[in-house]
Amino acid sequence: MPTHTFILNGKRVSVDCPDDVHLLWVLRDLLGVHGPKYGCGLTVCKACTSLINGVSVQLCGVLVGDLKPTDEVLTIEGLPGSVGKALHPLQQAWLDYDVAQCGYCQPGEIMHAVALIEEAHAAGRRVNEADLDSFRNVCRCGTYFRIREAIKAGEQMMIDQGLLKKPNAYDPILPGRELKREHHHNRAAR
Amino acid sequence: MATSTDPLIERPVSRRRFIAFLVAGPTLIAAARLERPAAASAAGVPTSQPVDEYDLSDLLNDAAAPTANLIRVVIEKDGSVSFAMPRAEVGQGITTAAAMIIADELDVPLSQINITLADAEPQLVFNQLTGGSNTIHSIYDPLRAAAAAARGALLQAAALYLNQPVSQLSTAGGAVLSSLGQTVSYATLSTKAAVSKNTLVKPNLKPHSAQQLVGTPQRRIDALAAVTGTKVFAMDITPPGALPTMVCRAPTLNGSARSLNNEAEILAMPGVTDVAVIPHSAHINGGVAVRAATFGQCIDAIRAMQVDWAPGTAEGMYASDVESQLIKSELPMTPALGDTIDERFVFNFRPGDPLETNCAVAVVTKDSAEIWSSLKAPIWAQEKIASLLGMQVSQVTCHVTQGGGSFGRHLFADAAFESAVIAQKMGKPVKLMWHRADNFRQGRVHPMCTSRVRMTYSGKNIIAFDQRHTSVATDFSHGLGEILSAYAATLPDANSLGYSQSIFLLTACSPYNFGPTTQLLEEVYPYDKFNTSSVRNIYSPDVRTAGELMVDKMAALQGVDRYQFRRDYARDARMVAVLDKVAEAADWGRTMAPGTAQGIGVHREYKGYAACVVEIDCTPRTVNRVIPNGYGGPRVTKVTFVVDVGLPINPLGLQAQMMGGSMDGIAQALSYSLHLEDGYFLEASWDDTAYTRQWNTPPDVNVIVMPPTTNEPGGAGELGVAASMAATAGAYWKATGIFPTRFPINYAEPLWFTPYPTVPPIPASPTTEYASVIAQEQADKAAGRRAEREKHAHHTTRHAHHSAKRKDH
Ligand code: FES
Ligand code: FES
């Protein structure tokens, strides 16, 4: 069985499994990392959203065989460490606004919010209402409004703490990439 | 938030009396139970309905009362306080509220209170059921009594220890303080205050004015776990040997697997360890189960299975068939004694899915079974599992895990039953999880129904209100049903009515003085033809939306403002108060642009009152927004919600509940549904079912919690849906001029999605060309196409999406 090596929350990990197992299951079922949640397995609900090389992706749509040893996977468990703090400012904002209800969707919400804010600032602007409307993560408990509030507050905290690189100094991320992929595959799957 | 008694508000004295016990144990344990409340006196309002005297909350309270002595508060040796709550926490915030109640009564910091969810304990009988938004209402007094008894015992122990009279002692911050300045912590006193035999005590409850936490906004006690990903749900629990397990389900609703025709091939697939055919029954959805190293490999195996299926329970049926059956079965109206307006409303099937799919962990040996699942009726589940496995109840342990939402679904234990049976059949522990597509297509749904409303009037006077609600049978075969049968004698007209009718009578309500009011329920089909549950919430959203739209219509006919009309006919002062408040806060009646409008809805249930005003945008620009792979449609742009729950425990939690309820109400009015075609539901993903998403979230939400109006906390988990759904429907009428009679309003529009096939029953997980995406990104970067990318920055403007054509099946 092939061995796959990649960087998970700052640490190099290796796992033996076939190439065609999705990363969500590699993390949850084989490595015991439970922050990313299952809500559909179709890259629709976004409960499994994590970052790969800083890009917001759905782990249920990434095959472990496609990872390179240098690829950095960041889940909610590794988020505080990624900024060298006990909590990432967005997690703090989530607490301040008492966002969570059942909490099942929230790891994915927070991880996508991190990418969304970083993307906007990489483009030299702040998060706007259209960005918030583009947020696809499902919250069946209906915490959407508090998520919007917490993102705005968290963005300000990230600015204040110097966590957002200045425009242009930032390595740009291709916006909309994830959606293009999803669009394509949803069609293909049906 | 005011917590003290406001002299301006008349707060009726609670009808409940309580006693408490000190329970023998190594440290201090206090327990309390409720005595049966005295019968309520008749409300004496001109329009009187069964619900006025005795509603579902009362029923659940009475059912809980005889065994509520097992509500126990334990002072641990380290001074912390433990309470194993006999209820399920599924996101509604009841653990936080319970911690607040205990902290207040015991003078312990919130951080020192540990709330866990109790395993199934048969001796709790009815007191372990989370339904009808009843939790806080039923445990508020016993919890206070138990905590107060513990506080009394701690004071006694401290009096001995310090050799001072109790009158010189007080409590604060988890310690007893003396007037001489001495401090003894609860840690020191916890064993000293322990008793060796059970002792009856009279708890000295704090007056409401001395409560410091109750009534103040407090954040959830599990929030940190939620935002760090450490909150443990059922699928995060892995007993040794428990491997991922899924079930290949039928292509039609409740079809049963006859045989798996390529078992050897499936067993040879990577990661697969076991397969088993699980026949369909009333309690087991069933199909062909597969156990593998990962859920991904279960999905692959399911997609490769060749299964011989027996027909399902709705073979060949369409929603239109159900609708004709409902209309045919409608109970007749009595002859009208004046002019009437009369409409029939149709409410389609809609899912009851939480974000966490049905799931359970099961370890079954020859003589024992251990199950982990989010169970709202764990005792019932435990008994059923014992009978399914051929075991004694005492051989089955049911652990109640935190739930990723519920919305009524976890009253059932479908996954727990299935997991137990599969684990027994395979002889191995399993982590059973449903696929999302199955959860939508084979899971429990809100029953399709019609509601016919007739209002009779004579000139300016409304003289009668009649509602005939006809519904696909709701499955009440869970614990709530057992409560009802045990307490049948206490129910209004119980002898002539079944479970559903009883629930309907206990919840149905028209909160107006419209003269003689009748609301009757009729059901069609056996309860297990469709898989139903009392999806958030039971009947009220539909009953009230139909009723409120007719109120709007009558107001228009009479030429009276919709808010004023409601106010004129409101049955009581609490209703008037929430109406006035919402009208003021929402700036009711402000001028709205063409294509936009305000709507208003009120509701009364679970000892609470709710009023909601929404603003909706139905302009073509908004309605025709392009949402890739999703449904846009009209957008509610503002929600103002006012709620009076009697005694609010945690206003912040209540606000969250009302916001969540409003998102539900918006979805149920506008877009959230399942299309029944040819014996199965077309929807298989969240994009298909069109629950509210960020692009349909109102950017402006204001929830106002009224100051205390009684001494009893009412339930809140479901109160938010009916008023917001009704307000949204009414706003839609005003904005478009189209009076909506079919829900959700978009139901008949061309499908915005291409239905996934039913064979294989679950879609393939997308396989991204992740490597090529990265390569593309690098190529983009090299080409410096930044400007191009910027142009495409917003997902919602990308990928012009055309309504997909419905496939032929
Ligand atoms: S589980 Fe990955 S997006 Fe839903
Ligand atoms: S908090 Fe429950 S699904 Fe979002």
Image: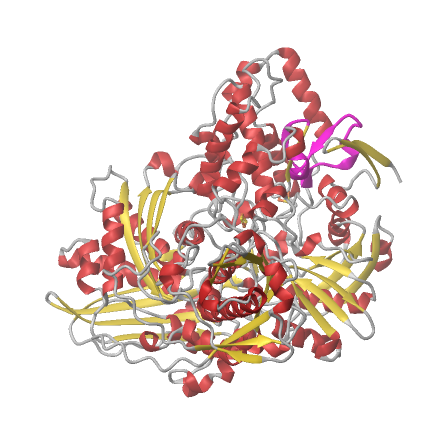
Question: Which image quadrant for residue B36?
Answer: bottom left
Relative to the observer, which residue lies in front, B581 or B172? B172
Q: Residue furthest top?
A: B783
The picture places residue A40, in percent across and down from the top left corner, at: 62, 47
Relative to the observer, which residue lies in front, A1 or B311? A1
Horizontally, is B580 left or right of B33 in the view? left
Answer yes or no: is residue B792 visible: yes
The picture places residue B778, in percent across and down from the top left corner, at: 68, 18
Q: Residue at x 39, y 41 (%)?
A: B698
Relative to the observer, which residue lies in front, B329 or B221? B221
Q: Residue at x 47, y 41 (%)?
A: A97
Is residue B363 shown in magenta?
no
The picture places residue A60, in percent across and down from the top left corner, at: 68, 41
Horizontally, is B595 left or right of A127 in the view? left
Up/down of B359 relative to A149, above or below: below
Q: Which residues are magenta?
A: A53-79
